[in-house]
Each structure stands twice: as C-alpha cells, then as structure tokens.
Amino acid sequence: MEQSLKNHLEILLRRTVEVLPTQEALAERIKKKGKLRVKLGIDPTSTDLTLGHTVVLQKLADFQAMGHTAVLIFGDFTGMVGDPSGRSKARPPLSLEQARENAKTYLEQAGKVLDVERAEIRYNSEWLAPLTMKECVELCSQMTVARMLEREDLGMRFRNQEPIHIHELLYALLQGYDSVAIKCDVELGATEQKFNLLVGRQLMEHFSLEPQIVMTLPILVGTDGVRKMSKSEGNYIAIMDSPADMFGKIMSIPDVIITNYFRLLTDKDEAEIKRMDEEIARAKRGEKSANEHELINEQELINPMDFKLELAELVTERFHAKEHGAGIGKKEREKFIAAFRKRDKEAIAEEIKIPPHLIKDGKVDIVKLLVEIGAVKSARQARRLIAEGAVRVNGVGKNLAELSVELSNGTLIEIGKKKAYRILI
C-alpha cells in the first residue's frame, strides 16, 4: 500500500471500533473511487445535540477533510418511527413538523464540528415518505423476525415479555434504505448502531448496489460515568451549553472516565492519554507520580482534578472559541478555580443591571429579579431556593420571598454554589 494511502487511512481509522467487512475493503474502495460518499444519519429527536453526537460527527469531518463527500442525513421521517437501538422501551413518536423544527437547530450545532457549507444535507422524508405499500412490503421481505430479535435490545424486551411494536421492527429497514437512496460508500455510526448499519449493506446488495462499508465509533459515556450520554437519561452535556455550564459539567464527571473524554473529544496523543490512565490509577492507590519532574501539586501526588481541568479547558475552547473568542477555555478554568477551589464568589460574579421596571420605591422584588435576569426558570423555583436558604444577598440568607430588597451598587447575590451576580446601579 502506498504511503499516501496509509497516511490517509491512519487518519480515517483513528479511534474507530470496527470497519466492516474489513479495513482492506475501505482501502480498496478509496483506491477504486478516490472520492467516497460518506453517510451519517441523525434523528432530530430533541432540540440539542450532545457531546456524544460529536464523536461520529468528528469522524464525518475527518472524511470531509480528506476530500470525501460528507452526507449528513436528518431523519425527519425515521424520527417519527423511533430508533429502538439500546432502548428498553419504545421511543415517544415525533410529528414530522417537530422533527423538521428540531433538525434546524441540529444543523446549526453540527456546524461546530462539520463544514456544513460543503456537506450534502438531506432529509430522509424525501425518499421514505413517497414509498408505496408495495415497496414497503418488498423491504420487509428482506428481513426475518428471527434475525431482528437477534438484536440485544429487542431480544431482551422479547425475553422479558415487554411490548415490541411493529413500527420498531421497521426502523432498521428504513435507515438501511437511506443508504440505497443516496448510494453511499461508507456509513458511520456508534457501536449500538451496528445492526442497523449492516442492514444497509444487505439492502444495497438487494438493490444491486455495491454494499456500503460500515464504520463504528465508540459511545461517549454520560456524566454519571455509567450509561450512554443521553438527554433522556439526564446525563448529557449539550453542544449549545454555555461555556460555564459546559466547563462545570465536565468537572462533575467521575475520574474513571476522564481519559475516555480526552480520547473521544480532544486531539490529545494516545501515549499521553495512557500516561494519564496510569497516573490516575496511582492516585487512587495513594502513590506518587512515576515522574518526579512532573509533579502536579504540593503533596507530590497526581491529582485527577488537574487532568479534569485540562480536559474541561480543551473541550470548552473547542466548542466556544469561535463565538466567545480564543482563550474562553482558559477563562472558564480560572473562574472555576477561583469559585470552587478558593471559594471566591467575587471571581465568577456576573455583572447585571437592574431593569428599571422592577425598581419600586428604591427596592426590588427579589423573586421577579431572579426570573428577569435568567438566574432561575420560574418564580416558583426562585421561591423554593429562597426557602431553602440557597439565595444570599451580600452573604446573608434569609426569607426574602415576602419582601422587597434594597439593592445598592455592588450588591452580591449568590444562588447556591455555582451562580453569583454583582448588581450595577
């Protein structure tokens, strides 16, 4: 294999799990066609993409950077069906209108990873909605119920006598038909999508097309350190989270998944990541660093917190530098250290001006103020936090719900441990 192709493949294969049928098949396809059509399908089931989505998006961007055609398919039609992959019960159905509305926000967010201007953007209702009943029956004839139940998710539900709806069985066939419609060469997906991706190969053969090559990517574990990152599980970090929220959520992850995040969300060298793994293991055993010249803290013990700070800085910088300027990751790191290591609320206080319409006789209704500045989502939440003593004015917490508060220039309002506001008059 010539060196240029080897270098090409090294980039494309980096941090993948499987290439089916083989890596050699991918190399042969590149040699044969030069420019490949590479597909990634995403069902717009909500308004937010998570950092978990960026793992496969980045691989699509890698192909794009190497001169291949990136085809990003929004499953507005399959979103109405619901992917059963990795699910213990059926997904709530979406309307076509909901799916398309969500897809608009997905496209904007995907642009943080992929050059969407150069990508081919498609919606699978384009070819799935016009299918006739005859064509649907033909698709169904390519799959047996027995094979469908080989899937771990559906098989488990069947053994547990939990409902499996007919439309869920159709999902893999519809996703596979996407590959037929766009005649793709490679399809990307997380490891849990392997069954669906292989169905795409099967259907392409049925329609006398060269079967796509399947490439699977690792699943990013959620902030709980156990389950896949998912909005439904509440363990996610959204691409559109504010820099402060993104940094803070990353700092909350368990130590055991720090290097998993480095591996899947940064360009950190693999040798360096393995060194981190070793140092974190030593820290858990209470041992000193293996390299006395790379001690991180005064106790001469590696502190996983230092690795986590670096991770949070890199990821925050990656997703927010374009909007907030270079160095945003470092700024959030400094604010975090000031707030949570030194307990210095002054360092993270956001300066706000009181809206004039809230001032009455020189005082302000604290509940209305917290809602107005976006510190809380509702007056009900504000009252609950006040009742719990989580709201403090100049360090003093008291029952503020029943009275207006006189706020002077420089007054510090704290909400829990993570939010602080400095009043400007």
Image (tube, helix red, strand yellow):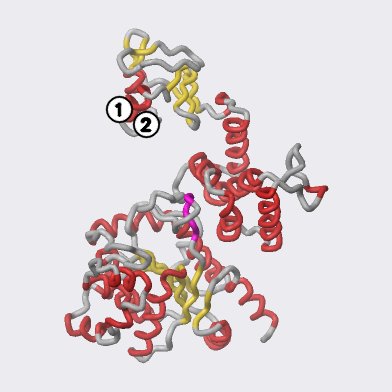
Q: Outermost residue toward the left?
A: 133
Residue 334, numbered label: none
> Which residue lies under the disc numbered 2?
376
Q: Which of 339 and 121 is in front in this view?
A: 339
Q: In which quarter of the image is residue 106?
A: bottom left
From this viewpoint, is residue 425 visible?
Answer: no
Callout 1, which amino acid?
Ala
- In the picture, measured across the screen, residue 278 lies left or right of residue 291, that is left
Q: Quadrant of residue 151?
A: bottom left
Magenta stretch secondary structure, dominant: loop
Figure quadrant of the C terminus: top left
Residue drawn where x is 44% and y is 57% of the image: 227
Residue drawn where x is 32% and y is 23% of the image: 368
Residue drawn where x is 46% and y is 21% of the image: 413
Q: Outermost residue toward the top?
A: 361
Callout 2, which amino acid?
Val
Figure quadrant of the N terminus: bottom right
At mark 2, the secondary structure is: loop
Q: How far apart are marks 1 and 2 (CA)?
A: 8 Å
Task: Pinpoint residue 323: horizontal percent, then vertical percent.
Answer: 51, 45
Task: Pinpoint residue 194: horizontal percent, then vertical percent.
Answer: 43, 74
Magenta part of the chain? 220-224
Q: Outermost residue toward the bottom?
A: 208
User: Mark 2: few, some, or many residues within 10 Å (few <14, many ≥20)?
Assistant: some
From this viewpoint, is residue 180 visible?
Answer: yes
> Which residue lies under the disc numbered 1?
379
Q: Which of 344 and 149 is in front in this view?
A: 149
Residue 222 lies in the magenta-colored region = yes
> Label 2 near label 1: C-beta < 8 Å?
yes
Image: 128 above or below 24:
above
